[in-house]
Amino acid sequence: MKILKGAMVVDETTTIASDIKICGEKIVEIGKDLDTSGCEVIDVSGCYIIPGGIDAHTHFDLDTGTTKTADDFESGTKAAIAGGTTTILDFATQSKGKSLKEGLKEWHLKANNKAYCDYGFHMAITDWNDSVCNEMDEMINEGVTSFKLYMAYKGSLQVDDSVIYKALQKSKSIGAIIGFHCENGNIICELVDKYLKKNKTSPKYHAITRPSIVEAEATRRLMAIAEVTNARVYVVHLSCKESLEEVLKAKCRGVDVIVETCPQYLLLDNKKYDLEGFEGAKYVMSPPLRTKEDNDVLWRALAENKIDSVATDHCSFNYKNQKELGINDFSKIPNGSPGVEHRVGLLYTYGVCTNKISINKMVEILCTNPAKIFGLYPQKGTIKVGSDADLVVLNPNKSKFIKADNQVQNVDYTPYEDYKLECEIEKVYLRGQKVSSKGEITCSNANGKYLKRASN
Ligand SMILES: [Zn+2]
């Protein structure tokens, strides 16, 4: 047994000076001055203890057809634990003409014996038919209780409104939830053609061809289909004010919608696309970065309970050789950026330390809500007797700068280069075992477990 002694323990509602006793993989006691006999005592005074972070949106070991993400499950999950995230949910994806089962099997092979944190899968459906519909039940039995549909990426991942309707009817009947990438892929395709024909090929045209209105339109359409089907929907990586407005209007009508945003939409803006040369490619992601005003709107929405969760959409490609695939054509730049390692530090520094959100709100959006939404609560996402001892010791008296040179993420840049973090992730425990210390991995084995999740 071990006792973490002397910290302020933070969950989604309270911040209390407490000791935490761990036996095996579980939290067995929480309270002041716990009996330490027979325990290893770890002094963490002056620090906060928060629940292990849950990043519900990562893409590790993803093949885009032209290249493969820089991070696989090993480097991606090592980066996660170094930064205080002990659970990730990655997107297993159905290939065209294949079954969901085959997609799931493929992702299990990618993650098995490689994951340093616990993990689960959402299942992205790209090729709908009756047998896929029936397979959704089997996915639930496999612990995959959430799905994803893309309203963008015409010709590859995109599905149409009738598929959205049918899939939502099915998900409602089996207690699943579907996440949606909301952008109008048809309009984007037209805009991309238009600018390429004018020989406008630089990274900034990525953003110009995916304006906020095409995200808001898809969000509005999804809200309508959700209303018709009465199913719960989850909007992934919401990036702008216009989309948020559509969600809020729908909520007033009684639509059951949950919203996720990402650190990049809170902290970065579209001025990055005006950087010299090809630098803007580092920020080519979908949706693209928006305005400073959008950043502010999203922060306020977090504070006012209008956004439920912050995940990273970690999808890393090296600047050299990978992002450069699109050096003569912005539409060929692989979409995505790294972030799984820095989510907790960034939200603490730029949210809590600036008084935009409380530390309890931070825990809610990084840990508790993702656990509740995706069927992991109270095993994960909180600090309670009986919960997994996934614990992060955050030292608010230390600081560090984010640098690509010293990150664990296996990628040659970070969108947050030289951002100061007003904390250090001093120790991270995964089911009772110390797995990282001061940003360094301290366990030699990939001990992450696959999480079978519950449906509603
Ligand atoms: Zn994504």
Image (cartoon, rainbow, N blue to C red):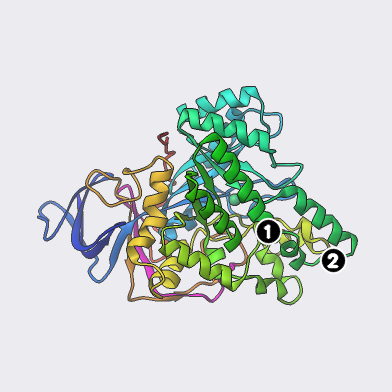
> Image height check: is 219 above or below 174?
below
Residue 3 visible in image: yes
Residue nearest the viewer, comparing 269 with 297? 297
Q: Which residues are magenta?
A: 414-435
Residue 92's x, y, as percent? Answer: 57, 39
What residue appears at the point 82 percent right and 53 percent down from the top-left corner?
190
Three-letter code, disc 1: Ile
Counting the numbered discs, the total is 2
Give SS at disc 1: helix
Is the residue 63 above or below the residue 328 in the image? above
Which residue is disc 2 drawn over?
200
Q: In the drawing, does residue 187 fall left or right of residue 73? A: right
Kind of residue sitting beneath label 2:
Lys
Position of 329 compared to 370: left or right? right
The tag on residue 383 is none
Image coordinates for residue 439, horizontal then vertical, percent: 42, 64
State the image quarter where residue 192 is shown.
bottom right
- The part of the image, by quadrant, that contains residue 5 is bottom left
Is 330 on the left-hand or right-hand side of 416?
right
Q: Position of residue 189 (x, y in %)?
A: 79, 51
Quick one: label 1, few (<14), some, or many (20+) residues within 10 Å? some
Query: Mark 1 and 2 residues: CB-CB less than 8 Å, in contact?
Result: no
Which quadrant is home to the C terminus? top left
Query: 192 or 83: which is nearer to us?
Result: 192
Among the 4 quarters of the image, the one containing residue 437: bottom left
Give the residue at x 34% y 43%: 377
Q: Residues within 10 Å of mark 2 (few under 14, many from 20)?
A: some
* Residue tagged 1: 213
Q: Nearer the viewer, mark 1 or mark 2?
A: 1
Q: CA distance from mark 1 to mark 2?
A: 21 Å
